[in-house]
Image (cartoon, rainbow, N blue to C red):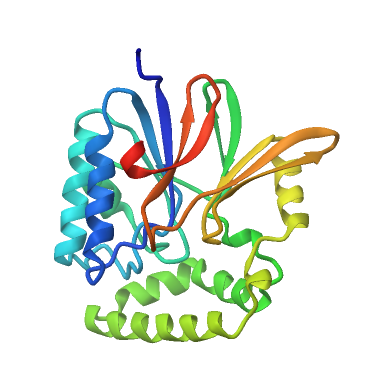
Amino acid sequence: MINPHKTIFVSDVHLQADEPEITQQFLQLLDHCDQTVDAIYILGDLFEAWIGDDDLTPLHQEMIRALKRKTDHGLPIYFLSGNRDFLIGKKFLQATGCKPLIDETIITLYGTRILLMHGDALCTLDVEYMKARKLMHNCILQKLFLLLPLKFRQKLANNLRNKSEHYKKNISKEIMDVTQDEVIRVMQKHHVQFLIHGHTHRPAIHQFLLDNINVERIVLPAWHGKGAVLCWYQNGDRELKEINSV
């Protein structure tokens, strides 16, 4: 039996030095991508934190080499930044061969139009986060941050991470989740029947009616447990799968 061609979508891997098992799972995923994989789309938060392309830790260098090996062998890998790695820049993209995407990207996959997002922009009930997100995506503030010494950026990033973890422990999961009204608005805006995103760490395939049409919102898994991805097959089938069964 011939294996069907497919495209892989992944998000929220959260690579970090103190969780080497996640690194090994991601490397395993790349190794398993054979000629039946037409492309990989990374929809944000590949890294737990990214404070600039000059922060070349051993982990970062290992990932750059691994991604470059796959793109050099002809596998298209697309990258859409998340709220943890929004500072990934041109040097990283050039070093890996990954192709950049912006939030709210439309692709046509095997004849189907699909909207791609990281997903944090859909969490409109989390007012405090939305304010912080606006600052994070301010180009001037990003440039000023990147001018700071690397060690100072590392310290500042650690403080922000600690504050973020404390904030998440004191806010309901419902507030941190996407709002259906925003999902509807953005899908109507782009005239799509499919939306794929990550961020919420609530993997699922949500089906609902929109303008009397069946539509889907697919939420990608986070990798805090076992690594998992979305496989979208050439025949239109799609499923969330652990990487050892991709």
* Relative image position of residue 240 (x, y in whole percent): 49, 42
- Relative to 37, is 105 above or below? below
Q: Position of residue 195 (x, y in %)?
A: 62, 42
Out of 26 and 188, give the one closest to the viewer: 26
* 198 with respect to 243 (left or right): right
**Which residue is pictured at 76% across the width and 50% down the height?**
185
In the image, 126 versus 242, the foreground residue is 242
Quadrant for residue 8, please give it: top left
Which is nearer the eye, 49 or 54? 49
Instruction: Identify the residue at the far right of this view.
Output: 212
Q: Where is 226 relative to 32, above or below? A: below
Which quarter of the figure is the C terminus placed in?
A: top left
Kindly identify the residue that appears in the image at 21 percent across and 63 percent down.
20
When the figure is inspected, residue 158 is found, relative to residue 202, above or below; the finding is below
Residue located at (48% from left, 21% from top): 234
Q: In the rendered image, which quarter contains the N terminus?
A: top left
Q: Is residue 73 placed above or below 52 in the rendered structure?
A: above
Q: How many marks?
A: 0
Q: Quadrant of residue 68?
A: top left
- Is 238 positioned to the left or the right of 49 in the image? right
Q: Is residue 202 left or right of residue 9?
A: right
- Whole-percent x and y of residue 205? 61, 44
The residue furthest top is: 1
Residue 10 coordinates in the image, percent (x, y): 42, 47
Residue at x 61%, y 30% (from the top left corner): 113
